[in-house]
Image: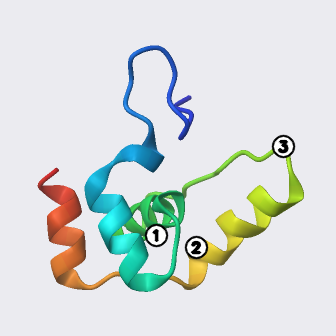
């Protein structure tokens, strides 16, 4: 289990500069970029985001339509 909001001293996904930069380019949140990156990383990976509110669930579902470029994926791999 790894909450996107972080816990303890872990970095929060929403604070990661590369995710923020790529998200702004696509009109997406850093969380959506993270989900899209995981989806495109491997067909063996299926992100299963948890949500306690309907808008959060919808945002996660909207990430399915986000397609990252090869350059963006490379930048995320190098982080």
For disc 3, the marked residue is: 52
Q: Which residue lies most toward the top here?
A: 8
- On residue 66, which mark appears? none
**Is label 1 in contact with label 2 (beta carbons under 8 Å)?**
yes
What separation in Å lies between label 3 and label 2 (alpha carbons)? Answer: 17 Å
Of label 1 and label 2, which has the lower sequence position?
Answer: 1
Q: Is residue 67 visible?
A: no
Marks 1 and 3 sit apart, C-alpha to C-alpha, by 20 Å
Q: Residue 52: tell me if it is visible.
A: yes
Camera-nearest label, 1 or 3: 3
Is residue 33 or residue 45 the one in the foreground?
33
Q: How busy is the neighbourhood of tag 3: few (under 14 within 10 Å), some, or many (20 plus)?
A: few
Lateral position of residue 35 relative to residue 38, left or right: right
Secondary element under disc 3, as helix, strand or loop, is loop
Which comes before the other along the chain, label 3 or label 2?
Answer: 3
With respect to residue 70, does 61 lie above or below? above
Specify the label residue 63 is tagged with: 2
């Amino acid at each position: 289990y790894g909450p996107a909001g972080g816990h303890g001293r872990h970095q929060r996904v929403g604070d990661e500069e590369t995710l923020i930069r790529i998200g702004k380019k696509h009109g997406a949140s850093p969380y959506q970029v993270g989900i899209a990156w995981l989806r495109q990383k491997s067909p063996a990976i299926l992100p299963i985001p948890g949500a306690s509110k309907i808008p959060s669930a919808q945002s996660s579902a909207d990430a399915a339509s986000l397609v990252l470029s090869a350059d963006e994926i490379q930048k995320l791999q190098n982080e």
